[in-house]
Image (cartoon, helix red, strand yellow):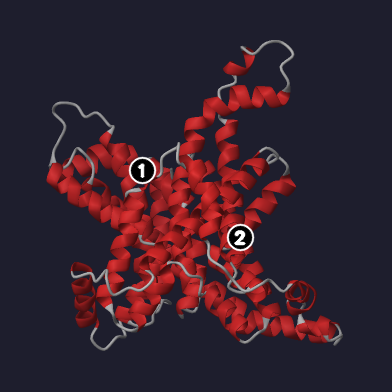
Amino acid sequence: MPSSPTVRVSFLFIAIAFGCLLFADMAITATNPWLDLGRFFMGMVTPDFLSIEGLYTAVLRTVAFAFTGVALGSLSGFLLSLVYRFRAVRLFCAFIRAIHELFWALIFLQFFGFHPLTGVLAIAIPYAGIFAKVYSEILDEADPEPRKLLPFGTGIVSAFFFARVPDCWLQLRTYTSYRLECGLRSSAILGFVGLPTMGFYLESAFSQTHYSEAGALLLVFYVLIATIPIWVRPKLLPVYVLSAPFFLGDGMPIVWGNVTRFFTEDIVPSPIRNSEGFGSLMSWFGDLMVHSALPGIWNTLILTQIALVTTGLIALAAFPLISTHFGGPIRRIFGNVFLVVARSTPEYILAYILLQLWGPSMLPAAVALALHNGGIIGHLIGRQSSGIKLRADAPVGLNRYSYELTPRVYRSFLAFLFYRWEIIMRETAILGILGIATLGFYIDSAIQDIRFDRAMILILITAMLNIGIDALSRFIRRKLALQTMPTC
């Protein structure tokens, strides 16, 4: 059975989630939610691939943005990982990865417009921070023995590339491949802010209730994700990376004066910009905190904790679907399909779909976050449980689940869950753009009102909140001696 500290922590988080439910808006407000849901599923089983103009272009640009952004992010992250031991570098990386890709896109849209550079940087910047952290952890775990076999006088750079990197190459490649899958999801949702990726066409199809078109787009996206091992071959990667920038499309010319004005005027708090004095600045900041920041923080924390616990429950319920210790091959095939769909659908897209079907509340967001993250953790734990050897007289059925396998994978399960805590927080904040009153809602409202100074303060608050949750997660994992494993 799991050790006592892990049980106490688990029940503590469950209690917090139940407390959050008292303050959460969990309701279905649509007039005919089940009718709309039925129409959506009918669209999924009767996809209309021919009616979508520009489908080929949308797929091509989704892939192009993903490859360009991930390539730039991985290269920058690798360079940052070499100096990650310095506190300033770690703080910088924590800050840039704490801001969601959509927030970066909203920032760059204000001065780059719908230029390809907006989408590329929106992916590359946060991914650089993520790559730096994970690459550094992988390199730090390299076996020191190969370096001792190098000839005397071998330089530091040569030793690094001929001893450390080869020892870690498989882990580096595996994690980069995983981030490419994430990059495809990030690229797709950039369409919701107007960039010409698949999310743009999906939003258009849903807004016009063309569910067969939406179903076709989702199925194409699932096939794109599921077939990555087939079409992303190591030998073809240089071709993809070098050719991707040529398929990003064209944009309006960048007006560099807008860039200068944004950083020197637009994001400067209005009392400072207008020389109104310290009193006006404090009044402006107090109004921002009371009417935007504090309500946004409160709702973000509530939704995050509910989604975190629900993610855990779904993961524990889902991992037997693909474990070789339960059921037969047919059941595992259907289980794998379910988990592939759950983890391949970005939370933002899933939340958007459920909001259209159920109406505005926290419920669609909580379900979207839990299904996506629960699918990821359930897949990882299911694979891990399949590698456990059971004795010949091991119990079967519910007893096997409760007394044999769950206790053995529970610590790994908690490690994955707490690892994704900060990720769930990032996604919770960004879902506010869809109308849920998290921090993203107030950020988007400020941008729509052309109050970029308020928007930037709220984005900074979001980043600090994510950094705080990440630090708390690492503290809990360390206290419980949980093995931290990257989601590759």
- 279 w.r.t. 76: above or below: below
- Placement of 417 over or under 205, stated as above or below: above
Task: Please state the horizontal and vertical placement of residue 383, each as a whole percent of the image.
Answer: 30, 40
Tell me what residue is drawn at x 39 percent, y 73 percent. Answer: 201
Task: Specify whether 170 is left or right of 37.
Answer: right
Whether residue 214 is visible here, answered yes or no, is yes
Is residue 314 in view from this perspective? no
Residue type of the residue flagged with mark 2: Leu
Please name the amino acid that badge 1 sits on: Pro
Q: Which residue is mark 1?
A: 229
Taking 134 as reference, is 362 left or right? Answer: left
Label 2 element class: helix
Residue 459: x and y, percent? Answer: 63, 70
Provide the residue designation for mark 2.
121
Residue 461 figure quarter: bottom right
Q: What element does badge 1 sit on?
A: helix
Residue drawn at the location 69% of the way across and 53% of the way down: 92
